[in-house]
Image (cartoon, grey):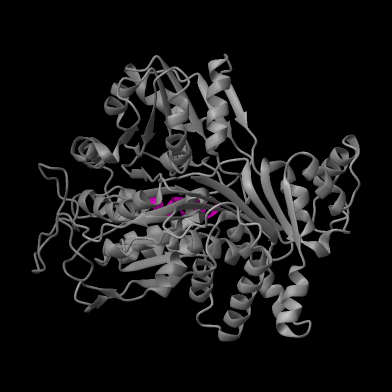
Amino acid sequence: MDLNILIGGPQGGGIETAGLLAVRSLAICGLEVFADREYHSNIKGKHSYAHIRASDKTISSIKYPVDILGALDVETLATHYHEVMIGGFVVHDSALSGKLLTKIPSMYGVKSARIGKFLEDNRIGETVEALDQWMKSQGMNVITLPFSKILVELLKSPNPLIERAMNTAVTSAVLSLMGITEEATKEAVEFQFKEKREVLDLNAKAVESVYYSLKTYVPGKAITKRAEKAPKLLVAGNDSVAIGKILGGLRLQTYYPITPAADESFTLEQNNEIKDKEGNVLGSPVVVQTEDEIAAIAMAIGGALAGVRSATSTSGPGFSLMVEGLGWAGNNEVPVVITMYQRGGPSTGLPTRHSQSDLLFSIFAGHGEFARLILASGDHAQATADAAKCLNYAEEYQLPVIHLLDKGLANCITLTSVDFDVGINRGKLAGSSAEKDYKRFKFTDDGISARAFLGNLPMWYTGDEHDEFGHIIEDPVIRDAMYEKRMAKSQKIIANSPDYDKAILFGPDDYEDLIITWGVSKGAAVDALGELNDMGRRVAMLQIRMMEPFPSEYVMAFLRRAESIIAIEANYVGLLADLVEAKCQTRVTKRVVKYNGRLISQDEIVGAYKRVGRGESRVVLTGGE
């Protein structure tokens, strides 16, 4: 079983809630789910949608065409009509039928012009009804129901609550067509609105009415399986990182609100008690919204110097402001974590859209040379584990750590398991006795100085080069020794880190073609491997995780075994491909890229692989709306 549904409507019209209702209903029925949320950067009005995939197998990506399109407004129909498969379903309110497809106030002019040209070229009228007839002629099933009328009857009069229940009504229709039981949908509604009794009652009645209206349309047997009582969480990527930080002993999180990073801090604020297995409260992370990103990195550094596990969270524009603080932390061997979510740039760019274009920026941010560790997660389970690992790495090696994620991972929702037994390594700590000669930056055999916390022992910190005590110095011999001490940490990390943190191979070991990718794009590549291996050649995928220090020898061992290497990533240049070329002396001439701000889907990878096989060296993907 593999179904894709898309539910769209105006921003502020409850699309996020609709997506959550659908995902939870599917999960209740024991299905694996993966949902992408696409939204504009305005507050209300522009088109947004949830693309939800459900399967009886583990999935980590979306796929086109969709089986069912649920439309809350005309723009959804005008935007996504071409993404519905032949034999699929389109559901919308019958009240939309007479509305014009090319006269939508919220739609961009260029988009309206494209739709108008399509309608003209195919001799389709400008109304929704005309488009419905055309879709039926192409083999799609169009179902119109009087959702507005149903809701008016439930309330006995027109009411502002109608708008708040329309998303539930359309989502119920979509789930009914999928074979999801009314009981499962109502259970999801109960969870979603449990604190709003009036809204809950209306939405539950809406579910009943819609299911009754569609009882003759349910295709085949209803899905009645119940989810197993397994320790799985239904989470977005932001939530996964927040959970990992809590498990990893985070005590101070600083942030300035920015998309798509802010939701992580909101999750931490909402879950402010850390408990042990017996339910005893151990403490709570302090979460501080600062006046800007410069203050956020500075405060996180201060927390780390005072001895608490500290992190800050941001995306590209905010990280740009943090760079001076990053360099200060590198110079002073401060164990601070920066969680960095990539989004479309440059400048403000596409604030709410996906990108993987800050890879090299993360590696080279800051003037001068200093050791840092960059770990890139590729799915929700990794995001949780890596969030805790980054706190360990920071304190073990006393350096800034960047946890690199992307908008796709941040905003996609899925079911994931969590390992709650996370080990905590605080690194080499100094005693608290009042030593006269405590040297914060003491040269040691292992290159790591014992770290004392502010207030425990006398110590000095400065942005300048310093001696073992921390005093400013420009002596060339001390400069060389201190420089080499900091830089040597990179080799120690490579030597001591587990292979799983460096790169992971998916697929057959005797591969002929090797795909290299990273971040959330890993999910689409893994999901596509079965199809790719049915095409006649053996194909594997290498997810590269540690970006700095780069595990050159480990990665090169995989590259040498491949007849052909294909890089797949969400940026223009192929930044991972460039990094691999520089670090592994191996040319990566076949590059599949996407930079329109939408996720790479499984079907796009299959299509791109075919194009590469036909001789194309650069494939630009353009799917998604």
Q: Quadrant of residue 92?
A: bottom right
Q: Quadrant of residue 363?
A: top left
Q: Magenta includes 345?
A: no
Residue 94: where, in percent of width, then height? 80, 62
Return the residue nearer the eye: 602 or 188.
188
Predominant secondary structure, magenta span: helix
Q: Which residues are magenta?
A: 317-326
Residue at figure coordinates x 42%, y 74% from the top left: 270
Regarding residue 575, the answer to whether it shows in the image is yes
Left/right of residue 148 with respect to residue 485 in the rendered view: right
Residue at figure coordinates x 64%, y 50% from the top left: 68
Return the residue nearer the eye: 466 or 122.
122
Return the residue nearer the eye: 206 or 387.
206
Left/right of residue 503 with respect to residue 181 in the rendered view: left
Left/right of residue 186 with respect to residue 437 in the rendered view: right
Left/right of residue 561 with respect to residue 99 in the rendered view: left
Q: Magenta includes 324?
A: yes
Q: Quadrant of the C terminus?
A: top right
Q: Is residue 374 above or below residue 261?
A: above
Regarding residue 573, the answer to whether it shows in the image is no
